[in-house]
Image (spheres, rainbow, N blue to C red):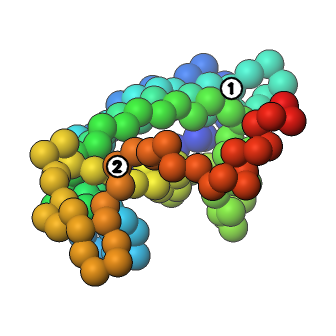
Amino acid sequence: MNIDLLRLKNNVDKTIEINEELEFQKDQLENTELLDLKDVKATGELKKDSMDDITLYLNVTGTMYLPCALTLESVEHKFEFTIDDKLENVLEEVKNDKKIENTIDILPIIWENILMEIPMRVVSPNAKPEKLKGDGWQFITEQKGNVNPELEKLKDLL
């Protein structure tokens, strides 16, 4: 998604509006935990301030599909994040080797922020573990009151 910065740098325009629907191919999702990305929309603007710095403001929303931690079925997870910083700082974080010239590709910026939004673990609301007990193990959903007696004595010190 290349954006022409020439009109902004030459003070022809004060802002460049961004309103894009983004699509990601299956090969882009490889080596990530994402099963699919849908309805990704980026809205915002590029603006030149009084110090001739270009500021990027973006609001990105969408839906990511991730594998359930218990059943591995696809779980829908909605996300939304905002990018609001100088363009130089944002490009530095993305480790873009290209200098800011007359165009900028903001898709790598958006992609890196989407990857940071992936939760550590998702569980489907209708997921139930199939086996609750096995040979020497059991599935625990919450901590019970079994406390080591030696550690119980430490409560008296506090």
- The vertical placement of 6 against 47, above or below, is below
Residue at 79 percent of width and 29 percent of height: 52
Residue 48 has which mark?
1
Question: Crowding at label 1, few (<14), some or many (≥20) Cα neighbours within 10 Å?
Answer: many
Q: Which residue is mark 2?
A: 141
Amino acid under label 2? Thr
Q: Is residue 153 left or right of residue 134?
A: right
- The vertical placement of 27 against 118, above or below, is below
- The vertical placement of 34 against 93, above or below, is below
Q: Earlier in the sequence, mark 1 or mark 2?
A: 1
Question: Crowding at label 2, few (<14), some or many (≥20) Cα neighbours within 10 Å?
Answer: few
Q: Looking at the rendering, which quadrant does residue 134 occupy?
A: bottom left
Residue at 31 percent of width and 61 percent of height: 139
Residue at 77 percent of width and 32 percent of height: 53
Determine contact: label 1, label 2, CB under 8 Å: no
Q: Is residue 158 visible?
A: yes
In the foreground, 117 or 15:
117
Residue at 43 percent of width and 50 percent of height: 119
The label nearer to you, 1 versus 2, is 2
Q: Residue 25: where, in percent of width, then height?
A: 25, 65
Q: Residue 57: where, in percent of width, then height?
A: 56, 29
In the foreground, 54 or 155:
155
Quadrant of the snapshot with the C terminus: top right
Q: Residue furthest bottom?
A: 135
